[in-house]
Image: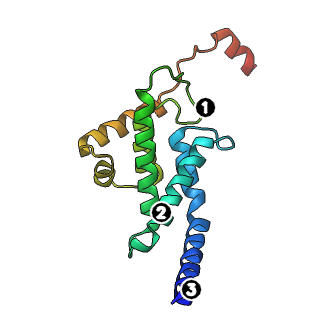
């Protein structure tokens, strides 16, 4: 009996290690996009990834044919949404803008953009995951894309300088 349990534990550990080897990089990148941290300096993203992988490992035997990547991604997104909601209402916390590429977006817009564009999650699935109507997900996604594609408002160089540069 003990030998069988030990063999099952070893098999489970090997399966999970193989999953982490294949999925951790992509999940870390998604978490880094969510937190809008710099790729080389992403402690919040690493914490989110660790918690998502720990939860997936705890549920490993109960997944029964469910895609472990989808399970980990769902947990990662839910944890990020919950933490963002709690941070938004926390009094006395300094709200600094993270330096990443998606820093101009709100946390909800980042979550939807990462799920929809980076992860390729369908609009209906993202809405169900976040508990939002599909139309709201579409609006958030459109608003985020508009924010990201808007050119920064910087003054144009004077005309004289442009002519001197081309001569």
Return the x and y of residue 139 as percentages of the image width and height. 30, 37
Mark 2 element type: helix
For the question of whether residue 145 can be seen, the reply is: no
Q: Which mark is residue 99?
A: 1
- In this rendering, is residue 2 above or below 110? below
> Do the residues under discs 3 and 1 have CB atoms within 8 angstroms?
no
Mark 3 surroundings within 10 Å by alpha-carbon count, few (fewer than 14), some (14 through 19), many (20 or more):
few
Return the x and y of residue 127 as percentages of the image width and height. 29, 48
Q: Earlier in the sequence, mark 2 or mark 1?
A: 2
Name of the residue lying farthest toward the front:
2
> Do the residues under discs 3 and 2 have CB atoms within 8 angstroms?
no
Mark 1 surroundings within 10 Å by alpha-carbon count, few (fewer than 14), some (14 through 19), many (20 or more):
few
Q: Earlier in the sequence, mark 3 or mark 1?
A: 3
Report the label total.
Answer: 3
Residue picked out by circle 2: 56
Which residue is drawn at the image coordinates 40% and 26% (left, top)?
89
Q: Which mark is residue 7?
A: 3
Which residue is drawn at the image coordinates 46% and 51% (left, top)?
76
The CA span between labels 3 and 2 is 20 Å
The CA span between labels 2 and 1 is 29 Å
Quarter of the image with the C terminus in it: top right
């Amino acid at each position: 009996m003990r030998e069988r349990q030990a063999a099952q534990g070893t098999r489970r550990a090997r399966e999970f290690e193989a999953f982490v080897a294949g999925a951790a990089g992509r999940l870390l990148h998604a978490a880094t996009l969510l937190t809008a941290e710099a790729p080389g300096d992403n402690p919040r993203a690493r914490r989110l990834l660790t918690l998502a992988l720990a939860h997936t490992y705890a549920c490993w035997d109960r997944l029964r044919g469910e895609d472990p990547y989808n399970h980990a991604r769902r947990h990662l997104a839910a944890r990020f949404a919950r933490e963002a909601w709690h941070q938004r209402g926390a009094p006395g916390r300094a709200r600094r803008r993270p330096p990443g590429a998606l820093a101009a977006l709100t946390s909800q817009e980042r979550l939807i953009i990462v799920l929809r564009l980076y992860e390729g999650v369908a609009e209906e699935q993202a809405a169900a995951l976040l508990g939002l109507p599909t139309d709201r997900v579409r609006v958030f996604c459109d608003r985020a894309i508009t924010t990201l594609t808007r050119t920064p408002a910087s003054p144009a160089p004077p005309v004289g300088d442009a002519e001197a540069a081309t001569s």
